[in-house]
Amino acid sequence: MTKQKTTLDTYKNDCAGCKACASDYQADNLKHAIARLNGISEVKIDEVTGKVVITYNSEKIALTKITDRMEKLGYHVEILSTEEIQ
């Protein structure tokens, strides 16, 4: 199994860019939407910085499928780093 840990920078497209105003409700909805995807092990969201850290099995799900889901929910997504973990 190939596990990846990816850190993303996100913000709501309908926001003026103030990440500090992100609500717990939005973060919970985003976390739930990502966590439901097959192959996701863990999702951590920092509502203040907009950083999302996702651990997933890259043999079951591609990173593009994860970021596509986030973009469909109205988030701008930028990949900051990806690393293979054991």
Image (tube, rainbow, N blue to C red):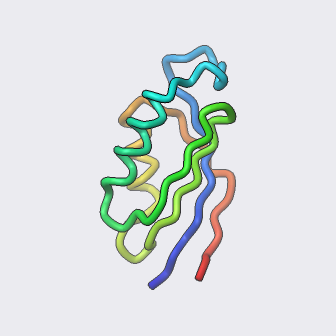
Position of the N terminus, as image quadrant, is bottom left
Query: Toward the viewer: 76 or 19?
Result: 19
Position of the C terminus, as image quadrant, is bottom right
Q: Is residue 7 left or right of residue 31?
A: right
Please tell me whether residue 4 is drawn above or below residue 10 in the rendered image. below
Q: Is residue 40 left or right of residue 77?
A: left
Query: Toward the viewer: 37 or 74?
Result: 37
Residue depicted at 42% across the width and 29% down the height: 74
Residue at the top extreme, as displayed = 16
Q: Position of residue 55 (x, y in %)?
A: 52, 64
Residue depicted at 48% across the width and 60% down the height: 42
Q: Position of residue 13 (x, y in %)?
A: 51, 24
Q: Is residue 24 left or right of residue 40?
A: right
Residue depicted at 45% across the width and 72% down the height: 58
Please tell me whether residue 64 is drawn above or below residue 72 in the rendered image. below
Q: Quadrant of residue 72?
A: top left
Q: Position of residue 60 (x, y in %)?
A: 35, 72
Residue at the front extreme, as displayed = 24
Q: How many marks?
A: 0
Q: Position of residue 63 (x, y in %)?
A: 47, 60
Residue depicted at 43% across the width and 37% down the height: 28
Please tell me whether residue 70 is drawn above or below residue 42 in the rendered image. above
